[in-house]
Image (cartoon, coloured by chain):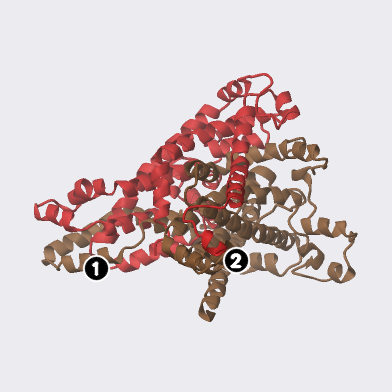
Amino acid sequence: MAAQIEATAARPAASARRARGRRPRGGGIRGREAAAGWLFTAPAVLMIVVFLVVPILMAAWVSVSDWSGIGNPFGGGAHYVGTRNYSALLTQGGLARQQLVQSITNNFYYVLLVVPLQTVLALFLAVALNRRRLAGRGFFRTAYYFPSVTSTVAISIVFLFLFSGSGVVNTILGDLGANGPTWFADPNGLIHLLLGVFGVHTPPAALANHGLLGQSWWDWLSGPSIAMTVIIVLSIWTTSGTFMLIFLAALQNIPAEVEEAAIMDGTNAWQRMRRVTLPMLRPTLFLVLTLGLIGCWQVFDQVYIMSQGNPSGTTLTPAYLSYLTSFGNQQWGEGAAISFLLFAIIVVLTVLQRFLLRERDAGR
Amino acid sequence: MSRHRSYRPGGLRPAARIATYGSLILFSLIYILPFVIELGSSFKTDADATANPLNPIPGHWTLAAFHELAQQDFPLWFFNSAFVSVSVTLGRILFDSLAGYALARLRFRGRGALFSAIIAVMAVPSVVLMIPKFLVLNELNLYNTYAGMIMPLLADAAGVFIMKQFFESIPPSVEEAARIDGAGIFRTFWSVVLPMARPALITLTVLSFQGSWNELSNFIVSRQSPSLNTLTSGVASLVSGQLGQGNQYPLKLAAALLMTIPVAIVFFVFQRQLVRGTQGAVKE
């Protein structure tokens, strides 16, 4: 989407021309133009206000209320409870906080794997497709991009089939002599499993007895569960195509002479990639990482269809938890509060990422 | 010497060539194979799909899954999806191009502030809006109605942005000529500017149709009635096993296949435009 947004990106020349070309006219025309301006923008603005701005204000009220889904939350059906919902989620050691912390842990590992892997894969595919004199470029590009245009619901069904107990993936693993797990029923964390390979099955006391926000360090360090790993694979598979197209567009904007000059200077392919191509792709890389980060903290559809947070809550994400808490358990105040916390997480991380990447620019 | 020999514009050493094509083909298999298996398995019997998941060719071809879907609510879901997606697409084309044109061309007080506000709104993640949307639909008595399913998707700041940027790229001389000839503002917009905006309108159409056809969360929070299920919400309910016994993979895969066809058609028809659209993407 954002790719398309930038697609028709601002052309300063055009607006400059307009400013010069049009001199202010008589008040009557001006007045008519102003009226038309408001009239033209009215429908779009009305929709945005009614279905975006007002709802956020309503949800802000609900997040500090005790609305339980009965009666009108804006007319006596709900009472002001201050920050109770937020403190239940953040400071009190109950189920609410335990679930939220678990969902954040899950989503954190999801982001940690999906964002770098999809970016690297997209970049790799784009670089491979950008070679000159490549046969079948159009075919490959279509093949990689097609999953991005299909619905998550359809893709999720296909993946449920591929990763079912006796499904495609386990059949292949079986042919290779390995025993595939029961993917969607396996809550074991990847890092825990890896430690198990080295004989660490029980947590050291230091990790088991201490923790943060009511979750032990051992549980923080579980890694994504096997079930979550399938969702991670699905996400990388579906979104890498979009980002590949964005990278491909950027690569095609690098003039051929730049690469040729680097070749004449006697650089090898890897040096050119690191010293020439990557620095020139920096703005694109930033765009892809930001879009990836924002999208990954919103993972909902896949969880809703494939796992509903199971097994043992290891595929819960904040987005799904807020849905479950409000629509499922009718605790609307708490659900809305989770939404706002998620919003805060996304904003903070985006700003942080921006800061980190800018910092390095300044050092250059 | 060898350094100089490696300079071959457009050429690749044989090893690099094999590695490039090898990995491109391997990845295209990874991207295509799931769809091939989806296609083949939807013509299988339940037992066949479970016993031979990897082989995409059915041992015994059957249309049972499709017959079963036809008897379920599937045709209704299809109609709902089509109706909602077409309405959203038409609405967005009209609203976004009107607003985009005004923000690009018409001078009025507050235009800059309005545009900044629209940009700010774009940054709100859609998942955060699930509960808020439900609250407002409930309040307006639009919950469980087609209008309630369509209207929230018409709030499309990104589309306004696309159209504004496009209109700014059109030279104003043409509309000025029309205005001098006495055409009113709306007439100039409708019969002179809008026809020139065809590329942007195609992009907006494809994105809107695809987006609303594939939309799930909006239809989870805006309706409850089974008769208002769209393909996404309806098929999602199939997965949670409302049909009872067995895993019924052929049925689910057939549903997934059928719901993919319309977006696939749109994709293949407009692919060239879309790819070109993205290719201007990161021009600075």
Q: In this view, does A83 lie to the left or right of B259?
A: right
> Which of these two is toward me, B31 or B243?
B31
Which residue in the structure is indicated by mark 2? A345
The colour chain B appears in is red
List x then y, in percent, for residue A314: 74, 53
> Upstream in the sequence, badge 2 or badge 1?
1
List x then y, in percent, for residue B181: 9, 52
Using the rendered view, name the quadrant where residue A90 is placed: bottom right
> Which of these two is toward me, A80 or A199?
A199
Which residue in the structure is indicated by mark 1? A16
Residue type pointed to by label 2:
Ile
Q: The brown chain is which one?
A: A
Q: Which residue is drawn at 48% across and 66% down?
A: A264
Which chain does tag 2 point to?
A
Q: Which residue is drawn at 21% across and 62% down?
A: A34
Residue B158, can we see it?
no
List x then y, in percent, for residue A260: 46, 63
